Amino acid sequence: MEIKLRTEQPADYRETENVTREAFWNHFSPGCNEHYLLHVMRDSPAFVPELDLVAEHDGRIVGNVVCMKGVIHGDDGVKYEVLSLGPISVLPEYQRKGIGGRLIGRTRELAREMGFRAVLLCGDPDYYLYQGFVPAELLGIRTADDMYAMALHVCELYEGALSGVRGRYVEDSAYEVDETAAEVFDREFPAKEKVRGTASQARFDEIVVVRRPAD
């Protein structure tokens, strides 16, 4: 399958939002709000347009990945700029074909060239540990509320990029989704059934609670 990766253009926005909606619908919870998140995060000063990539197959957008600037508040009092990856989405019928991995790999290449030191995200270790990420706890990196979390992962973009950097990782506030606004935005798309109790929702509920206080 020939897949082309390129930078997203404004004319792609609605198609990409639909791809994101399809990819996340009923995945973590009934329905989803990731397409609304994508819609609003593009207007944030922390958004990195050079790392807004789409995957195309036969001229159709089948995947997307975006990044925002985040920060690690170091225990040494220094703030270290990093990247927050996500949402990353691939249409359900195109999943398990390596497209997500290609999007992540290209993101890492570009981010390294741009001078960023690391990429962080919250996600399932069953996937991201195979995409070059490691548990953030191994590097002493905690959540904003100073907890070690199973879902938090980090990928250094060059050897020793986070050497000696320990602290709290804080995402941009754009990730704090307004649920009411997301519901209103979703009405602009074709109606879809919200389903509760899926296997992916159970897996998410299992992962998200695995947290412990920093030592």
Image (cartoon, grey):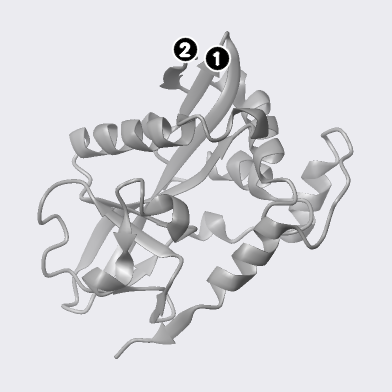
Which quadrant of the figure has residue 81?
bottom left
What x and y, as percent, mark residue 166? 21, 73
Decide: is 15 above or below 206. Answer: above
Spatial distance from mark 1 to mark 2, Cα to Cα? 6 Å
Q: Nearer the viewer, residue 159 or 179?
A: 159
Q: Which residue in the protein does label 1 denote? A: 57
Residue 31 visible in rendering? yes
Residue type highlighted by circle 1: His
- At x 38% / y 81%, what residue is drawn? 146
Element carrying mark 1: strand
- At x 33% / y 30%, what residue is drawn? 106
Q: Nearer the viewer, residue 169 or 200?
A: 200
Element carrying mark 2: loop
- The tag on residue 98 is none
Q: Which residue in the protein does label 2 denote? A: 2
Q: Residues within 10 Å of mark 2 (few under 14, many from 20)?
A: few
Decide: is 148 above or below 135. Answer: below
What x and y, as percent, mark residue 31? 78, 51
What x and y, as percent, mark residue 128? 40, 52
Question: Which quarter shows the C terminus?
Answer: bottom left
Which numbered disc flags the more N-terminal residue, 1 or 2?
2
- At x 47% / y 12%, what residue is drawn? 2
Which quadrant of the figure has residue 168?
bottom left
- At x 56% / y 77%, what residue is drawn? 209
